[in-house]
Amino acid sequence: DYADVLYFAFRHAMGRKTFAPELVVKSIIKNWAIFEKFERDVFVAEIQREVVCGGYGSIAQWLQWKKILRLAKVDDETVEVLEIKVITNERRKANENTAH
């Protein structure tokens, strides 16, 4: 069904530094009501995992993924911790790039 297609699109867009995350997030938000709670929880868990692993893409993509966390009503403290992790990852990447 369409929820499955959007989930696969979500997984494909995760980590991409393209316009794909923005398009996928817009579609997920527009169709949020079609997802069961457990499916919404999967989106949240996947985003959290990718942030911890550094696979979220970049700051621009993080801002898109954060919209899903807000829609899923993830608490502010959790979102803040994830955002700090993203900023730390981005600073590390920038430092590695300037070191070369």
Image (cartoon, grey):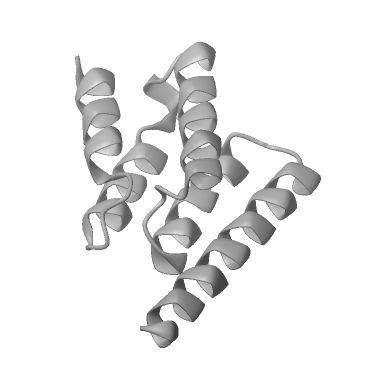
Question: In the depicted view, which residue is nearer to us: 72 or 34?
Answer: 72
Is 79 situated left or right of 86 in this image?
A: right
Q: Residue at x 73, y 42 (%)?
A: 78
Residue 100, position as x, y percentages in the image: 35, 83
Asked if 63 appears above or below 75 in the picture, the reply is: below
- As drawn, the residue found furthest toward the front would be 100
**Residue 5 in which image quadrant:** top left
Asked if 21 appears above or below 3 in the picture, the reply is: below
Residue 67, position as x, y percentages in the image: 52, 51
Q: Residue at x 22, y 62 (%)?
A: 18
Q: Quadrant of the N terminus?
A: top left
Q: Residue at x 42, y 87 (%)?
A: 98
Asked if 82 appears above or below 75 in the picture, the reply is: below
Is 22 situated left or right of 68 in this image?
A: left
Residue 50, position as x, y percentages in the image: 46, 41
Q: Residue at x 60, y 67 (%)?
A: 87
The mark total stands at 0
Residue 19, position as x, y percentages in the image: 23, 62
